[in-house]
Image (tube, rainbow, N blue to C red):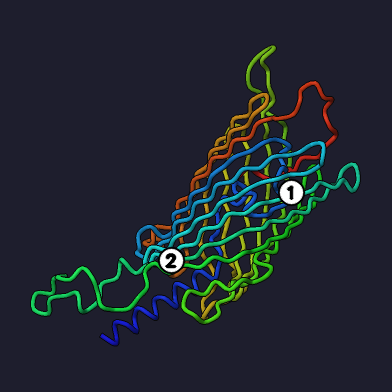
Amino acid sequence: MYKLVGLVVAMFVMCSEAAAQDPQFSQFYAAPLYLNPAFAGATGQARIGTNYRNQWPAIDANFNTISAFADLYIEEKNSGVGVIINRDREGLLGLQSTSIGLIYSYELQITKGLSFRPGFQASIYNRGINFDKLTFGDQFDPTTGQVVNKQSVEGLNSGQSKFFPDMTMGGLMYSKNGWLGVTAAHITQPDQSLAGQPDRLPMKISGHAGWKFYLSPGVMGQGFYNKPRERSITPTVQYRHQGRFDQMDVGLYYTLEPLIIGTWYRGVPFKNVNGNVNNESIVMLIGFTKKGVKDVLNIGYSYDYTISKLGPSSGGAHEFSIVYSWSTRDPRKPPKDKLFIPCPDF
């Protein structure tokens, strides 16, 4: 029995360490407010979106993350406002976290071809755990090995949870072709402990950048209905540091409107973890974009092929995204001279 309790404690510690690293999305530009609060209102339109990620579905210790967001550009104030809701759950012990955040950003035009957007997010978190999936020795019949007791006398609190506030800040510099952003999440490093001892959520520092190379546009339709279609190649990079964890995404997107294809490498090959090279996965994406006169619909699917020692037998990771934006401005107003961030939609 003591060995079993020790195993449970060890698993709980492992879960706590895993949770010390924030959930991540492979389609990070399809989760813009999660990536950087400065993206609130960045489309110049109203926007809603949702992201779902199922990581390592073939093993018990899998992770499920879902995020939903909405944002709006307020033209008269050069401002963006947004709200984001995130929920992630680890499958083995049911360790889960739910957060809701309110976001504000402001647009500053530095020169005619260069803009800067600072952003701020205030959030409230709820973190909880339950042990309903675990079975203890006093629940088994010692003769048959069958579970005969639905309840255990082990004093583990399945309903334990904790609320705490959090803050995130970000900035985004961009031109017609390129962008550079930085985000600092969990600035106050709030205590997320569920076991009595302090457990500070480490600050996460991330940077993201890219450059879009526009190619000769394609054409769809004829005559009056003739409409140009974007053709471009966009290399991007994202780097994240949180506590003992470092992660990097390097790759590119190829836009052949209405299709977008992407591939990138995730890992930090120049940094070893416990003596092993930090290679995590190769990500492959296919996306669809439909651009109307006043609205845009983006739908994406990506798959992470695991190249770490965990291997492809873990099931990799499946991720889905859908984002819809539409114009809210008065068509009678003259168009505003405004730069738009050229980053990918996924």
341 w.r.t. 242: above or below: above
**C-alpha distance separating marks 1 and 2:** 38 Å
In the image, farthest residue toward the top: 223
For the point 59% across and 46% down, the residue is 69
In percent of width and height, residue 88 lies at: 48, 58
Of all residues, the one furthest to the right in this rendering is: 111
Q: Find disc 2 in the rendering and name its residue.
A: 95
Q: Is residue 284 above or below residue 89?
A: above
Q: Amino acid at mark 2?
A: Leu
Q: Residues within 10 Å of mark 1 (few under 14, many from 20)?
A: many
Find residue 265 and report its image quarter.
bottom right
Residue appearing at x 67%, y 53% in the figure: 236
The picture places residue 81, in percent across and down from the top left corner, at 70, 45
Along the line of sight, the residue nearer the viewer: 182 or 229: 182
Residue name at image x 91 percent, y 46 percent: 111
Q: Residues within 10 Å of mark 2 (few under 14, many from 20)?
A: many
Q: Residue furthest left?
A: 143
- Describe the element under mark 2 as helix, strand or loop: loop
